[in-house]
Image (tube, helix red, strand yellow):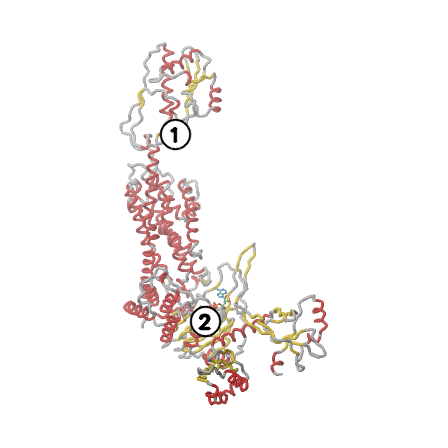
């Protein structure tokens, strides 16, 4: 099938990813709903705040248009209790100048002639001087609204002064203006009574009417301009947090890596998220403006629709770009809420500062303004301030599209206008997206792999012709050279032969057309992790996961890679699929090198990978997964439906095709992963433990699928099921500790590394309870020197070692002849199992590594004596045991097993036996002096004497 390439493939991947984003958003309805409609909640809150503030200043005319002002006719001095926030008992007014009798009578007249309410003398307090009044005010705050100070200069001149608290106050929706309420009535009263006293006419008419100007609304409170920035920032934070968490989840669950392995273009990935978020942001901003208009805010009604809409759209889009950039710094999706909250708090504080005028005024330098404008919430705060200033009174026309480049009439500094804000928002959005892509490349991905810091300076990156080799470790890891690899010649003849064949082909540059994969000395060393702590750079030791693999995988064959946990199987696979960079060596997959980026992009088109752990979106169904991966792979659109249906049928998921993978059982998920690996007819299929967690019926079914998949392609399989390896593989390689230990087909491995043959002898059922078990046992003991490994009433099982192979033909001929005599119904002879081969190889590797590392353990003898012996040593001579009967001393044979982690441990030891006389004892035994001293003195651990097993076995 011809796969799509170039721009067509990019477009196809983009469409598939866009559909995936749409489906994920549709399935996560609650989050999408919040992203789209959270604005109604916040705008409703703004509406309530606006109404509350308007109600609070409801009695002030400053907040209302007054066209025909009401006159205030001869206002009386009000009782002090009417003053807001008064402490009782209180005084209507206090006065100074009590030394003068004339002043005293003027004050009496003021009290008596107060319009509508004569003031009792108890509500007025007199003092001699101004200073006395001030002292009283200090000692008695909030006890009086005003003070009068009189001075009788001569018979015709009386001066007076007036003191009031001029702070306007509001209480329970009423507004108190002290000038009109206290100052002017007091002033009118005092002037009236002074005039009457001077002209000597107590009934002289003195009426003053007051009237404020007719005016429009002179003061307004805009909830949008003041608290709006933090509310609209909160709306944008929904998108911000959701976007960060979507990107991180795809990284964390290695979904992005799985898509990259299938040949995903990064451009398609970023574009799909950008356009999807762009659409969501567009609708969210549109709803914000519509809801604002619905609540009849002047801000939304008087400014042009397109001007306001563009502010919200560009700001929210900018925050999405900001989220893209932040996602590169975060590795856990659970941190996205914390990051969102932190950004919100910082944004809230900087917005408050912006609303108070920093730094968009002449008193601050341009540098401050430039730095400040990089943080999107600040631009939003400034934009909202400009727009709300432009609609501060209902008469203001607001900002129209044609005036976005102009400054507001009262903006004397005019340092930033709406069009500047739009430009800032667009440019910083581009910057965030560019930085997001850059950081995404240079920070380690989920496999710890990254590009070099200046990868974009390499022309190969732009031309797509290689050169951008990836690196490992964090960007600021302490520099240390990678240790050299430790490659030793293999001990096994088959592995050596394979290695020599591959090396020769490599030397000759021969490309065998029958080979799918040629691995040339693959070495992988994981660099140690770097931790910065306490002014020190701590680095864990590097780990040699692969120590030089040389192996060929022919076409049309299934190669099974076996090995205990941590052997390096997944590492080998990750190197082949490009997930992990190789340290040394190379591999050619159908002639393409995994070390070149061009080679890797070709390889990705021809491989299918079933990773060790299922990499699936919980919210997508099996069918959707297959559509997505088939599109990423580049299958022609016309064939997608048929291929997907066929794949689903192959893995028996047709009925569950539309069910979300969240509801799949473990086995169903594995089957879906296998189907994804096989989609698009890849030439090399890599299956990392594909049948883990499957029941025996499903496993057998998957075996059938794998068996069919072998035709026409190479398959690399890793598994811990020996049965699976035995049934499916054409060749098996067993790895331990990063090295290939043996290679060959199942029969060869069993015959070379198994303990020998297994003979199963079944007996006829008898009525007389006479069995011939003992006769048969005797026969086996006599001829082959073996005893049964297992036995019961109806059969006996013997393990016959390899070295008895020469005796077997005659032995079984004779046994068959005597079948009737022994009551035998059936004799079966088979090789030992692959599991046994595996265990032997794993144990051998443990012996080797223990010897290489020089590890010691304690052997406690039956006598209670403890000896330090090297791990893996078989025969141990016991110090201090030389006697006349045992002139060479005594020894024990140590039996080794493996613990749960596979490490060697002592499982027992033989009885003490004399050391044969021909055994060359090491110097240690002859220097019994040293041993004796330590042994008797118990001053340190006593070391057993290691005896060469060859000397014992040949005896
Ligand atoms: N990113 C890494 N950094 C450091 N060490 C690693 C890393 N990945 C794997 N290793 C180590 O490399 C060794 C080989 O791991 P690998 O996953 O290849 O083993 P495996 O044979 O696939 O094991 P299993 O059967 O358990 O899957 C292990 O000891 C592992 O701890």
Q: Which quadrant holds the C terminus?
A: bottom right
Circle 2 SS class: loop
Q: Nearer the viewer, residue 464 or 36?
A: 36
Label 2, residues with CA under 10 Å away: few <14, some 14-19, many ≥20 = some
Q: Earlier in the sequence, mark 2 or mark 1?
A: 1
Is residue 182 something one can see in this rendering?
Answer: yes
Q: Nearer the viewer, residue 267 or 92?
A: 92
Q: Which quadrant holds the N terminus?
A: bottom left
Where is residue 395? Give x, y as percent.
Answer: 28, 36
Q: Are marks 2 and 1 in contact (CB under 8 Å)?
A: no
- Residue 162 lies, with reference to residue 454, above or below; the image says above
Where is residue 815? Give x, y as percent.
Answer: 48, 87
Where is residue 569? Give x, y as percent.
Answer: 47, 70
Q: Nearer the viewer, residue 495 or 153?
A: 495
Residue 933 numbered tag: none
Q: Which residue is mark 1?
A: 169
């Amino acid at each position: 099938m011809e796969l799509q390439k170039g721009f067509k493939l990019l477009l196809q991947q983009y469409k598939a990813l866009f559909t995936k984003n749409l489906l994920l958003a549709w399935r996560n309805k609650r989050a999408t709903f919040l992203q789209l409609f959270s604005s109604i909640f916040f705008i409703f809150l703004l509406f309530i705040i606006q109404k509350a503030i308007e109600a609070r200043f409801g009695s002030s005319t400053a907040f209302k248009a007054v066209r025909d002002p009401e006159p205030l006719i001869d206002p009386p001095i009000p009782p002090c209790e009417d003053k807001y926030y008064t402490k009782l008992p209180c005084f209507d007014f206090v006065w100074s100048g009590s030394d003068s009798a004339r002043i005293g009578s003027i004050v009496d007249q003021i009290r008596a002639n107060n319009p509508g309410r004569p003031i009792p003398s108890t509500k007025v307090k007199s003092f001699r001087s101004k200073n006395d009044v001030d002292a009283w005010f200090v000692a008695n705050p909030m006890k009086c609204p005003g003070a009068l100070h009189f001075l009788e200069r001569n018979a015709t001149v009386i001066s007076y002064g007036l003191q009031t608290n001029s702070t306007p106050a509001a209480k329970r929706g009423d507004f108190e203006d002290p000038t009109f309420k206290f100052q002017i009535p007091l002033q009118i009263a005092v002037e009236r009574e002074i005039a009457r006293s001077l002209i000597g006419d107590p009934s002289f008419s003195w009426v003053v009417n007051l009237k404020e100007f007719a005016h429009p609304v002179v003061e307004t409170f805009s909830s949008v301009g003041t608290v709006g920035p933090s509310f609209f920032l909160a709306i944008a934070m929904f998108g911000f947090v959701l976007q960060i968490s979507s990107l991180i989840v795809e990284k964390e669950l290695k979904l992005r890596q799985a898509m990259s392995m299938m040949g995903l273009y990064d451009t398609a990935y970023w574009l799909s998220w950008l356009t999807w978020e762009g659409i969501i942001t567009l609708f969210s901003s549109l709803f914000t403006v519509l809801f604002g208009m619905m609540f009849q805010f002047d801000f939304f009604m008087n400014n042009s629709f397109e001007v306001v809409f563009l502010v919200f759209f560009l700001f929210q889009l900018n925050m999405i770009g900001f989220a893209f950039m932040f996602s590169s710094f975060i590795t856990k999706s659970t941190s996205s809420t914390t990051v969102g909250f932190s950004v919100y708090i910082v944004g809230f504080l900087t917005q408050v500062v912006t609303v108070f005028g920093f730094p968009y005024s002449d008193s601050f330098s341009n540098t401050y303004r430039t730095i400040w404008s990089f943080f999107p919430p600040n631009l939003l705060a400034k934009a909202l301030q400009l727009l709300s200033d432009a609609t501060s009174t209902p008469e203001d026309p607001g900002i129209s599209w044609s005036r976005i480049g102009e400054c507001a009439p009262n903006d004397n500094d005019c340092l930033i206008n709406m069009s500047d804000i739009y430009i800032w928002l667009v440019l910083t959005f581009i910057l965030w997206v560019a930085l997001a892509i850059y950081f995404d490349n240079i920070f380690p991905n989920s496999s710890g792999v990254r590009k070099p810091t200046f990868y974009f300076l390499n022309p190969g990156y732009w031309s797509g012709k290689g050169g951008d080799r990836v690196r490992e470790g964090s960007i600021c890891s302490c520099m240390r050279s990678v240790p050299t690899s430790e490659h030793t010649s293999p001990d096994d003849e088959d592995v050596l032969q394979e290695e020599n064949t591959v090396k020769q082909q490599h030397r000759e540059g021969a490309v065998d057309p029958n080979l799918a994969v040629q691995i040339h000395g693959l070495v992988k060393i994981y660099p140690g992790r770097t931790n910065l702590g306490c002014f020190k750079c701590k680095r864990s030791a590097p780990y040699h996961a692969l120590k030089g693999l040389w192996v060929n995988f022919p076409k049309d064959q299934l190669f099974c890679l076996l090995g205990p946990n941590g052997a390096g199987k997944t590492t080998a696979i990750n190197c082949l699929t490009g997930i992990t960079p190789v340290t040394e060596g190379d591999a050619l997959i159908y002639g393409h090198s995994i070390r070149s980026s061009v080679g890797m992009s070709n390889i990705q088109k021809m491989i299918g990978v079933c990773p060790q752990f299922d990499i699936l979106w919980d919210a997508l169904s099996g069918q959707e997964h297959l559509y997505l991966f088939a599109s990423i792979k580049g299958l022609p659109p016309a064939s997608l439906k048929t291929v997907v249906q066929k794949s689903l049928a192959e893995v028996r998921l047709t009925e569950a095709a539309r069910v979300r993978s969240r509801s799949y059982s473990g086995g169903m998920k594995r089957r879906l992963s296998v189907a994804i690996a096989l989609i698009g007819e890849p030439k090399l299929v890599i299956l990392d433990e594909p049948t883990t967690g499957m029941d025996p019926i499903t496993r057998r079914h998957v075996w059938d699928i794998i068996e069919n998949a072998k035709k026409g392609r190479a398959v690399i399989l890793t598994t811990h099921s020996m049965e699976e390896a035995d049934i499916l593989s054409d060749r098996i390689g067993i790895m331990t500790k990063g090295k290939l230990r043996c290679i060959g087909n199942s029969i060869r491995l069993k015959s070379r590394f198994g303990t020998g043959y297994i003979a199963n002898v079944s007996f006829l059922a008898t009525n007389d309870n006479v069995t011939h078990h003992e006769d048969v046992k005797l026969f086996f003991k006599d001829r082959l020197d073996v005893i049964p490994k297992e036995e019961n009433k109806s059969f006996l099982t013997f393990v016959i070692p390899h070295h008895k192979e020469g005796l077997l033909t005659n032995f079984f001929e004779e046994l068959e002849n005597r079948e009737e005599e022994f009551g035998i119904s059936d004799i079966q002879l088979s090789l030992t199992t692959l599991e046994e081969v595996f265990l032997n190889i794993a144990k051998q590797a443990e012996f080797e590594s223990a010897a290489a590392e020089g590890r010691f353990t304690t052997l406690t003898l039956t006598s209670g004596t403890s000896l330090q012996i090297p791990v893996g040593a078989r025969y141990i001579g016991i110090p201090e045991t030389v006697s006349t009967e045992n002139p060479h001393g005594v020894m024990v044979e140590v039996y080794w097993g493996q613990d749960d982690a596979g490490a060697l441990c002592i499982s027992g030891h033989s009885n003490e036996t004399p050391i044969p006389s021909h055994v060359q004892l090491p110097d240690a035994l002859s220097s019994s002096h040293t041993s004796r001293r330590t042994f008797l003195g118990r001053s340190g651990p006593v070391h057993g004497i290691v005896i060469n097993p060859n000397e014992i076995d040949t005896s």
